[in-house]
Image (tube, helix red, strand yellow):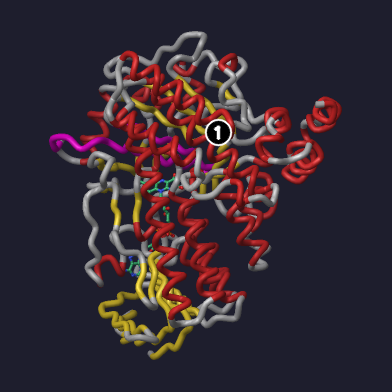
């Protein structure tokens, strides 16, 4: 079989299929090559407001109305109930002491809840990837992409203008001649191996490993005694990315609406602990409240073990090939950064392919794509490494996460106001002020400060956040339970160079105002201000 294509995409996860769909809308001939077969179990499930906004932007820019409903829980449930998913109202953290049942005080010293949405309708989601990815690859095929599953590519060669890929599918030899190759095959993927790309150890994050699977019969944390009291909480803590954090690692629990729960642990690598299954059980022995949550849980997929969990290449593209960010690196799922990084990369790479032709212009654009991709992975790694260094220091861990939440909520609001220029770089890392402070705070946290240095760092984080805080993150009276309130955005309009009317319209567009008439209530207040 011989196939001529403008773009060959290797890997039909959500990223490969989305890129294929967008390219087809621009009339490109696309071949999408997958070594496995859908539906298949794959990890990486929890989305964020920025990821969802990027899905919306992609859907609008490339006229993909079939993709847009997946950006919010409500539209997803109404339009595609056949695709399983989970409701994610925010990020929930519980901080455990090893070998002790979970306990907390009225000030929530050992928890943190940050809402991303004011109600379920516009909530974020967990993507049940077997369904989600199958749906997208079918859409790509309907849009005219040639989709080859169960295909092994064993040779790739690049010359100045073209790429040729040779492989086999069900015993038939396949030759693909393409103008450009997009590697969407995930970490340690196709081109990382075929081109033997350099992938040195990470710089700031200690070596970590991941153990994970899908379960049934995981009880809700809020149904356990350990989960009480929850009066006044900003959302049900299980309708979220639920994190159980402890010194040396953390566990994620993501519930889908089909009875399946995704759970696993990311752990700083220590001495080997026997089999993977034993590893999980041993871990739960030291976390009695989490063990209670999993008392009747049963894995419904094989255990997966990723060691090391993180991966980074130093090269991201060549003259006629590029890795998506998810193929160039995976840091850690702690802050659900994989989807937004990947989606930002898809936007950037599609722009390169659309606005340049092979030659000097494209080379320069690809170099810029590589620079930004690596810088975003660096910023993510630095923050996640700072968090790992603080897992035994709950107050500092919580403070550091606020850097993430401040950057994420500010960036989302700026983009939704049509002012992406206010929020340069993922996590605002390229912002001249916030980026510098983010860098400095992470470096200080990595040094594990104590005493005065610890207090200074907390004060530094607060002052870094303040000009960008549009979510009331510095309001200590909330005792680490942060609801998503239109009022906070309205009161911070000036930080976004916006008027009260701008914010009013934004809240209306985003569905805040429909359920909570905060805009009207605050219009009078802010116009008088
Ligand atoms: C443990 C863990 C948990 C994570 N959790 C989150 C999370 O909660 N939120 C978040 O935002 N991000 C998370 N991530 C990151 C997330 O997994 C990725 O961002 C996301 O999966 C990227 O999607 P993708 O389509 O690019 O790649 P993948 O989902 O990895 O899909 C790659 C596809 O390529 C195929 N493939 C691989 N090699 C080849 C080959 N040689 N030839 C042909 N096909 C090939 C594979 O079969 C697969 O179908 C997590 C990562 C890990 C490791």
Query: Does residue 305 appear anywhere in the picture?
Result: no
| Screen quadrant of the N terminus | bottom left
Q: Magenta-highlighted stretch: main secondary structure? A: strand
Image-based side of 75 in relation to 171, left or right: right
Question: Camera-side residue: 253 or 161?
Answer: 161
Image-based side of 311 in relation to 39, left or right: left
For image coordinates 22% across by 54% down, the residue present is: 200
Question: What is the quadrant of residue 513 in the picture?
Answer: top right
> From the viewer's perspective, is residue 187 above or below residue 45?
below
For image coordinates 81% across by 31% down, the residue present is: 517
Question: What is the quadrant of residue 125 in the picture?
Answer: top right
> From the viewer's perspective, is residue 266 above or below residue 370?
above
Question: Camera-side residue: 372 or 29?
Answer: 372
Rendering coords of residue 26 (x, y %): 61, 77
For image coordinates 46% across by 66% down, the residue present is: 16
> From the viewer's perspective, is residue 126 above or below residue 160?
above
> From the viewer's perspective, is residue 97 above or below residue 106?
below
For image coordinates 25% across by 31% down, the residue present is: 281
Image-based side of 517 in relation to 48, left or right: right
Question: What is the quadrant of residue 162 in the picture?
Answer: bottom left
Q: Which residue is mark 1?
A: 239
Rendering coords of residue 155 (x, y %): 26, 80
The boundaries of the magenta stretch are 249-272
């Amino acid at each position: 079989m011989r196939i001529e294509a403008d773009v060959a995409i290797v890997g039909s996860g959500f990223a490969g299929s989305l890129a294929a769909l967008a390219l087809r809308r621009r009339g490109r001939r696309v071949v999408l090559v997958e070594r496995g077969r859908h539906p298949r179990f794959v990890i990486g499930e929890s989305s964020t407001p920025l990821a969802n906004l990027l899905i919306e932007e992609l859907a609008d820019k490339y006229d993909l109305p079939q993709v847009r409903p997946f950006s919010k829980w409500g539209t997803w449930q109404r339009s595609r109930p056949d695709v399983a998913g989970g409701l994610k109202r925010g990020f929930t953290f519980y901080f455990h002491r090893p070998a002790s049942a979970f306990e907390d005080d009225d000030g929530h010293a050992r928890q943190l809840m940050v809402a991303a949405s004011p109600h379920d309708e516009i909530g974020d989601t967990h993507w049940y990837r077997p369904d989600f990815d199958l749906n997208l690859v079918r859409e790509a095929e309907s849009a005219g992409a040639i989709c080859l599953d169960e295909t092994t590519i064993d040779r790739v060669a690049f010359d100045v203008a073209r790429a040729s890929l040779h492989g086999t599918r069900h015993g038939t030899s396949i030759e693909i001649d393409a103008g450009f190759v997009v590697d969407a095959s995930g970490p340690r993927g196709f081109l990382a191996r075929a081109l033997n790309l350099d992938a040195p150890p990470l710089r700031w994050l200690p070596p970590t490993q991941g153990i994970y699977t899908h379960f049934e019969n995981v009880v809700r944390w809020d149904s356990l005694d350990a989960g009480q009291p929850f009066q006044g909480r900003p959302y049900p803590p299980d309708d979220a990315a639920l994190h159980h954090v402890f010194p040396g690692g953390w566990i994620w629990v993501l519930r889908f609406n089909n009875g399946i729960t995704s759970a696993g642990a990311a752990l700083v690598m220590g001495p080997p602990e026997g089999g993977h299954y034993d590893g999980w059980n041993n871990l739960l022995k030291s976390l009695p409240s989490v063990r209670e949550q999993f008392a009747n849980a049963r894995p419904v997929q094989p255990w997966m073990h990723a060691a090391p969990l993180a991966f980074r290449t130093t090269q991201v593209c060549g003259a006629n090939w590029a890795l998506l960010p998810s193929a160039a690196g995976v840091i850690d799922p702690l802050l659900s950064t994989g989807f937004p990084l990947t989606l930002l990369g898809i936007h950037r790479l599609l722009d390169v392919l659309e606005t340049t032709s092979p030659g000097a212009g494209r080379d320069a654009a690809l170099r810029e794509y590589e620079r930004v991709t690596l810088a975003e992975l660096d910023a993510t790694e630095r923050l996640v490494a700072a968090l790992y260094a603080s897992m035994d220091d709950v107050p500092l861990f919580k403070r550091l996460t606020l850097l993430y939440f401040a950057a994420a909520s500010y960036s989302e609001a700026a983009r939704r106001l049509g002012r992406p220029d206010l929020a340069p770089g993922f996590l605002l890392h390229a912002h001249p002020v916030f980026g510098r402070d983010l860098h400095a705070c992470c470096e200080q946290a990595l040094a594990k400060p104590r005493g005065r240095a610890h207090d200074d760092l907390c004060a530094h984080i607060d002052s870094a956040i303040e000009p960008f805080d549009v979510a009331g993150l510095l309001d200590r009276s909330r005792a680490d339970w942060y609801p998503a309130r239109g009022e906070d955005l309205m009161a911070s309009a000036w930080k976004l160079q916006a008027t009260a009317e701008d914010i009013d319209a934004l809240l209306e567009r985003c569905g805040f105002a429909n359920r909570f008439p905060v805009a009207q209530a605050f219009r009078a207040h802010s116009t008088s201000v």
